[in-house]
Amino acid sequence: MALTLTDSSLVVSRGFIGGAWCEASSGRRLDVVDPATGRSIGSVPEMEGADAERGISAAAEAFGPWRTLPAATRGQHLRTWFEAVTAATDDLAAIITAECGKPLVEARGEVSYAASFLEWYAGEAQRAYGDVIPPVHADKRMLVIRQPIGVAAAITPWNFPAAMILRKVAAALAAGCPMVVKPAPQTPLTALALAVLAERAGLPPGVLNVVTASVDSSRAIGQAICESPTVRALSFTGSTQAGIALSRQAAGTVKKVSLELGGNASFIVFDDADVDAAVAGALAAKFRNTGQTCVCANRLFVQAGIHATFVKKFTAAVAGLKVGPGADEGVSVGPLIDDRAYAKVVGLVDDAKNLGAQAKLGGEPASLGGTFFQPTVLTGAQPTMRLAHEEIFGPIAPIFRFETEPEVIGLANATDFGLASYFYSRDISRCFRVAEALECGMIGINTGLLSSAVAPFGGVKFSGLGREGGRYGLEEYQEIKYLCFGEIDS
Ligand code: NAP
């Protein structure tokens, strides 16, 4: 095991079902690889549909006792888990960096962001209020209560190995729903370390189950989850293509499906923007996690009057980013997750260059080899280029030039996606106009960072359904029940 941790017992090589650490029923295992070196850092069970069914049964058994706990007690479990996760920040960050490649400083930030969902939902558990409706007849009383939906399942991606899990699990558990989690095959060690901390925090058996899988075996797990009538809610974060496939599969059991899918964020800089603030925001929105986040700025639109100044300052700022393995000091751009991601980025940059984009900076693989790519600034980007329509998921910043506000709103909305957008302007009327006109679920106005446990995260159009975070996140795991009382004497 190449990982050196303060608490080495956080690295486990077995799945977690019904409070027990277990192997795959097939006995097969899956290697976990450090994308910075290509070397194995451990292995986990390659679980199948039958293992997912065991997880679902364990969660179903845990449902009754868990849902009947007082909300404050469920909240206290989440609070204790929050404290355990926070205390293990450095070790969890080291695991995240080792299996997903992001710089260590960002991995620490992810642990804090992930833990904040436990803290937030520890409180929200107690605020699952219902409603009292003014009755339509004098002898009736009408109430609405919220109840846990039942067993829930989560399928999560590799780019935020801790946060994408806790964003779902914290809300589900607060609502009273046990959960089965299938982490991404690239990043199962973080998921299992979180389960170790949950067990230590005293979470009852079966309330959290982690079923690890390979790319080959995850299809069977997805099928078992989607086709199970016991699973009443599925929360998926990942690509739009996979989200569509899973929701088709889940249709037969009429379960609640929440989808947090891909994005194609616009980042608009108007002539009246504070250009230095816009440069700092663009750097954060573009290069976080080496450009591999769903809310990464995919298309930078800069108005003609500020274009030259922005390009100059932004290029200088990007030139200061250090590329290297995430665990190295001062690194802010790590490797891409795998060869497939690398090939996609190379293809998108070649396509853009062939169609007339100019590389102001970078534009080539980094000298480190492997899946490292240079932080790149492209000017002369055009809507005909592939990167205008596809998620880049890499450290490439294409800059489009525009003239007018209506023109840029048309350009920004010319995508099937609708997750996040950002814009910079100091005109308050324009801020409202543009925020209302952009077709997306989240907007950063004069900021490049918008995610928070207290706010709703999610998209419109092909970017998904439902919301995570804030009070809205709890609703994904609740049923609304209407109670009508008759024969009331008044
Ligand atoms: P992905 O290929 O769709 O995979 C996401 C997860 O789904 C993985 O665990 C994957 O496992 C699993 N999966 C895919 N198809 C499945 C199926 N038919 N049955 C069961 N499991 C299945 O996405 P990714 O490449 O890991 O992540 C990047 C994508 O996630 C990007 O599009 C990004 O924008 C999106 N994302 C969205 C958000 C958001 O909140 N909206 C946040 C983060 C990431 P396998 O790899 O084994 O198939």
Image (spheres, grey):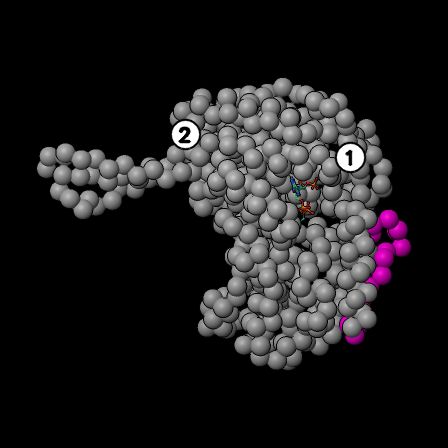
Left or right side of 281 for 350: right
Left or right relative to 468: residue 350: right
Which numbered mark, 2 or 1, is in the foreground of this view?
1
Q: Which mark is residue 32?
A: 1
Total marks in image: 2
- Find out whether residue 367 is within the magenta segment: yes
Q: Could you say which is closer to the camera, residue 36 or residue 58?
A: 58
* Mark 2 vs mark 1, CA separation in Å: 37 Å
- Residue 200, percent from left and from top: 60, 22
Is 235 positioned to the left or the right of 105 in the image?
Answer: left
Does residue 52 sit above or below 305 in this rendering?
Answer: above
Q: Position of residue 65 (x, y in %)?
A: 45, 21
Residue 435 seen in this snapshot: yes
Name the amino acid, label 1.
Val
| Circle 2/circle 1 CB separation < 8 Å | no
User: Quick one: which residue is furthest to the top in this view?
Assistant: 20
Q: Is residue 136 above or below residue 128?
A: below
